[in-house]
Amino acid sequence: MSTYTVEDPRKVTTRRLAEMKAKGEKIAMLTAYDYSMAKLIDEAGMDVILVGDSASNVMAGNMTTLPITLDQMIYHAKSVIKGTSRALVVCDMPFGTYQGNPIEALASAVRIMKESHAEAVKMEGGAEIIESIERILSAGIPVMGHLGLTPQSINKFGTYNVRAREEAEAEKLIHDAKLLEEAGCFAVVLEKIPAELAVKVSESLSIPTIGIGAGAGCDGQVLVMHDMLGINKGFSPRFLRRYADLGTVIEDAVGNYIKDVKNSDFPNESEQY
């Protein structure tokens, strides 16, 4: 049973996140992709659950986030929503559903909201996609931004290294963050940027910043659930803290089950009718 007690049992909304930033209360965010895990994470007291396009990696085994489709994201988000009562559920818009075409972007976002019942969408990029963001916001759909390392642009960057170390890129990131705020985004994820820059951006915005590999100066933090629970053992960046070693726990449990079946130890007399 979780030792963490939720001080405010209210349903988390975009307005609630703004209140948390104003009060200096940190925002906890974690990914989920299915009903069972979403229910556990929500009951533990999570503020925001992200239905991440990282499902492409940890659920489907793809090397990047690019292959996952809109239909697949809707499926995952719909499953997560069914297991959630308190957390705000945000769904990633997958690659190719919003870049370069604001009309298509709105149609994609509307499908996510109508078919999955997710409560917001997340989009990667700044000035390059601002028209799509504005079109979606005009329909009353909340948008969370995402700057810094944007995994959907991996083929452009060619690396997952820290972004915005150079002054020009840092200035662009600050400019993009303000653009997102002015457009009406309710929060922005800052991924893998220098901690000093993340502090500067966080202090310059009235909307919350959620960091991943961006230091402690952000208004909140997000991790991929499979990474922080030790299910995905092959990913160990500096910013990742493992809170459990479920990979080993699961392997041991499965191994013991196989052994008991092979030795005719399972089921025993008390485990049959």
Image (cartoon, rainbow, N blue to C red):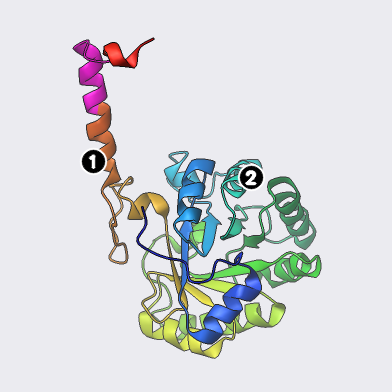
- Name the residue at 47% across, 83% down: 170
Question: In the displayed structure, would residue 175 be above or below residue 138?
Answer: below
- Residue 269 picture location, percent across and down: 28, 11
Write the start and end of the magenta stretch as one range: 255-266
According to the image, label 2 marks what residue? 78
Q: Is residue 148 left or right of residue 99?
A: left
Question: In the displayed structure, would residue 105 be above or below residue 168?
Answer: above
- What secondary structure is the stretch in magenta mostly built from? helix
The answer to which image quadrant residue 265 occupies is: top left
Q: In the picture, which quadrant includes the C terminus?
A: top left
The numbered dot on residue 248 is 1
- Residue 234 picture location, percent across and down: 28, 48
The numbered dot on residue 178 is none
Is residue 14 rendered magenta in the image?
Answer: no
The residue closer to the viewer here, 120 or 200, is 120
**Disc 1 vs disc 2: Cβ atoms closer than 8 Å?**
no
The residue closer to the viewer here, 203 or 82, is 82
- Disc 1 element: helix
- Name the residue at 60% across, 52% down: 94
Q: Is residue 69 left or right of residue 237?
A: right
- Residue 177 picture location, percent across and down: 57, 80
Compare marks 1 and 2 and give the one earlier in the sequence. 2
- Name the residue at 63% across, 45% down: 78
Question: In the displayed structure, would residue 208 be above or below residue 161?
Answer: below
Is residue 262 rendered magenta in the image?
Answer: yes
